[in-house]
Amino acid sequence: MPYEAGQRLPAERASRLGHLDVLKSPLVAKLCESFEDPGMSGLRQPLADWERIPSGGAPLRKVFAVDGSLQVIANEIPPHKTLAFIKTALLRVDQVALQSIDRHMPHPYALRDLMADSALYHATVLPMRHVRVPGMTVYDAIRRAIFESVKDASLEGEPMETLKWLTYEKWGGQQRNLPPFECPHCGSGNATLLYDSESGPCPDCGKELLLTDMLGFHLEMAEEAAPDVVASAYMLIHETLLLFTGVRYFWEHKREVLADCLFLKDGPLAIRAQYSKLVAPIRRFLEAARTSGIEVCMAGQEKSGTFVDHLALIGPTAPEGALFVPGHDYIREEIQHRPVRGAPYGKDTNYGAKVFVKLSERHQMVLSIPTRIPSGAYLKDPCVSDLIGAPQIFATLPTLLSSQYEGGLFPIELAHNVASLSTYPSARVLAMFAEAHGA
């Protein structure tokens, strides 16, 4: 690895001739000669069990989409003070408004009018490294910033109410305390909060606990610095809270309307690592709603990653109007390429099953759709009939297709337009803002 540039001297440059020794190596030449490029037609085709897309459902008239964006801005001069700017957005559209938009070349004014009264967004900033907050370490400053951000007054604190609704399982009608978690102060595993509390004392050390501590952000932070993954985890959590804020509102006020709503998320329906504590209550809610006669129609769309790459491999030979729900063994062997040992895919992290969909020659996508969970057990090998609200979801998707991007869904595109923080010029603008405020 080369030396980095310092304040006085330039960076070390890689040799422009170093590759010659590699090219002259007999072993390298022998190995390269043995490689073949089979092309797409020569690759082994996995045995994907494609099925016809379920029919019989009516298109859902109300569509909600959520997306988020993140920019980590680091000062170029050591000690490289770093801030993370995060933005999330929730967009609501109805089928009548969508039909008025040209999917090939949407007019900017038409998009402006559509989003004027239908979009909510949240913005925050986290002090990641070498940024001083009076009286606090970076560790405590980020904990407090996350707590206050979830309580964002511009959204009237609704994401915090949704967090309490999920973690205390208020949808079930029974008062239950928070499950134990690790205290951010003393490390005790007995930390908990009383029902419906946003904060309270640790049972062991007596120091203040915040409800957001339950999620475990502090487990990845040091006293004076935090990795960028903390910011990306916060963005994912807030996207999830925004998505379920809509679900919660209708569940509490107009429960019958849920049957006519589709909730879309940019990205898979999954929460990983210690943050997956939200997955179990989400699964239990979706199953409780289903058994009560209300199917919450929800889907996440993946735009990149190994599952999207795999669809590019199996999609060309798939029939149109078909879908494929891969089981654990297929995902392990054909997509993850990992050994037999280990837990079933997504057992603790996913609240939606992967679904490969080919609507037409021009529209194929990777979705996550929640599944029924009999007796609370995880479905290792879900099938089409297990997908909650599948007929309604697949009746709605053709009305949401966009022609701007491969497999594009128009509501997700619109949510991205609201939430996006592009690398340029947004990153430069945010850097200038941070410099102006002394960060």
Image: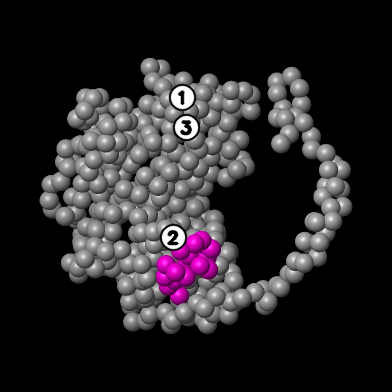
Name the residue type under label 3: Ala
Q: Secondary structure at mark 2?
A: loop
Up-down: is 210 above or below 56? above
x 27%, y 36%: residue: 189
Find the distance from the CA under tag 2 to the CA under tag 3: 32 Å
Left or right of 57, for residue 85:
right
Please provide the residue range marked out in magenta: 324-340
Left or right of 285, for residue 311:
right
| The label number, if any, that marks residue 224 in the structure image | 1
Name the residue type under label 2: Arg
| The label number, if any, that marks residue 226 in the structure image | 3
Asked if one can make out residue 117 in the rendered structure from this viewpoint, the answer is: no
**Discs 3, 1 touching: Cβ within 8 Å:** no
Q: Secondary structure at mark 1?
A: loop
Up-down: is 101 above or below 86? below
**Discs 2, 1 touching: Cβ within 8 Å:** no
- Mark 1: few/some/many CA within 10 Å (<14, 14-19, 20+): some
Find the distance from the CA under tag 2 to the CA under tag 1: 38 Å
Give residue 175's position: percent from left, percent from top.
13, 47
Residue lying furthest left = 174
Q: Nearer the viewer, residue 123 or 374?
A: 374
Find the distance from the CA under tag 3 to the CA under tag 1: 7 Å
Give residue 296's position: percent from left, percent from top.
29, 64
Label 2, on which residue? 341
Give residue 248's position: percent from left, percent from top.
25, 53
- Mark 3: few/some/many CA within 10 Å (<14, 14-19, 20+): many
> Which image quadrant for residue 345?
bottom left
Ranked by sequence position, the earlier of labels 2 and 1 is 1
Give residue 283's position: percent from left, percent from top.
28, 59
x 74%, y 19%: residue: 8
Left or right of 300, for residue 148:
left
